[in-house]
Amino acid sequence: MKVLVTGSAGFIGFHTVNKLLEEGFEVIGLDNINDYYSPQLKYARLKEAGINQDDIKWYQLSESTHNSNYKFVRMNLEDKQQLFSLFQAQNFDYVINLAAQAGVRYSIENPDVYVQSNIIGFHYILEACRYFPPKHLVHASSSSVYGTNAKIPFSEEDKVDSPVSLYAATKKSNELLAHSYSYLYGIPITCLRFFTVYGPWGRPDMAPMLFAKAICDSKPIKVFNNGDMQRDFTFVGDIVDGVVRTTLTEFTTELKYRILNIGNGKPVNLLEFISELEKGIGKPALKNYMPMQPGDVPRTWADQEELQKITGYKPESSLQTGLKVFSEWYKEYSGII
């Protein structure tokens, strides 16, 4: 079975590729290795998977030195002709689309790149799946689509037509496009609404990495909304287990489309998260309390009953265990970030 994983040099993409390879799949990874954050971290993830930086060429497959079942190609999703050629040549059984321009706050400053990558790029993924259909397309949506939803926990049935960031608006647009393509062309599509993911090899613009760096450097961390925030923090190992389970789960309904939350199902207060991270790093944090930022929300909490019912997904990692693993990784690898 052959799987395309887009965004494979990214945080969740890197771990998803590793999980698929462990389970014996043939994997093609795709990423444009942009400079939204340090490309060196992305190259380091690829190197960990056996893809050497010097071997990477635009639009050409590079083979892993660690696993012959893994190949990587550097490409933009917006490169329609190249994307179609890849789909035609590889005949993918499954497509896991994790590539996107990420970041809620960055979307306020740089809206153009979000429209190009998250909407136009995703449209071309849908078109490629239309003409070269896989058994299942799994797409990374986001809990940010829930906006300032006051009802908790967040359910897939909740109204989500009032996004408070452009990033969230692009993710909601993706879900609508996916529904149309599934309905019109019979493409089996699942949109997974990811909640806050943390773990080794994480994104340096996300709170866990920012906090860890500040604590290690004895610099203050920014604690927004004066710490009165909750996030459904989920360890990356649990997330990729859910992604793979979802990918391999067939539809039993006539409509081959679904939206599923994927998280831990246990919201954690931000100050509790920081406290556990302090224990893992072995140093206290200097806290700079700040007001809420535009585009942020005070609380996220995943109702994932539907995901559990369909796939058997059940997060196994406690916050303490997950942050211990993350902290140990960070102290060993922080020099490359």
Image (spheres, helix red, strand yellow):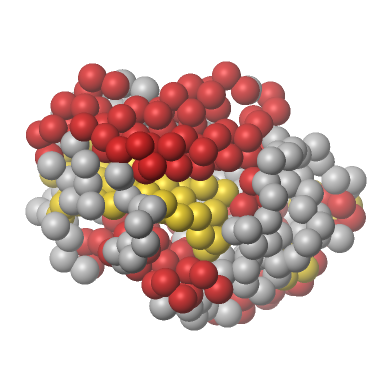
Q: Picture coordinates of residue 101 (x, y %)?
A: 51, 34
How many tags in the picture? Answer: 0
Q: Residue at x 21, y 27 (%)?
A: 84
Say left or right for 204 vs 26.
right
Say left or right for 324 vs 228.
left
Residue 103's image quarter?
top right
Q: Picture coordinates of residue 156 (x, y %)?
A: 60, 58
Which quarter of the figure is the N terminus placed in? bottom left
Q: Residue at x 34, y 28 (%)?
A: 124
Q: Residue at x 17, y 45 (%)?
A: 92
Q: Picture coordinates of residue 149 (x, y %)?
A: 77, 53
Q: Residue at x 85, y 59 (%)?
A: 227
Residue 289 shows up from this direction: yes
Q: Nearest the camera: 47 or 232?
A: 232
Residue 185's image quarter?
top left
Residue 282's image quarter?
bottom right
* Location of residue 165 with respect to 70 vertically, above or below: above
* Location of residue 144 with respect to 329 vertically, above or below: above
Q: Nearest the camera: 64 or 105?
A: 105
* Location of residue 313 with respect to 192 vertically, above or below: below
Say left or right for 94 vs 40.
left
Say left or right for 226 vs 324.
right
Q: Nearest the camera: 271 or 146?
A: 146
Going by the picture, which residue comes out furthest to the front?
254
Residue 46 shows up from this direction: no
Q: Picture coordinates of residue 85 (x, y %)?
A: 16, 26
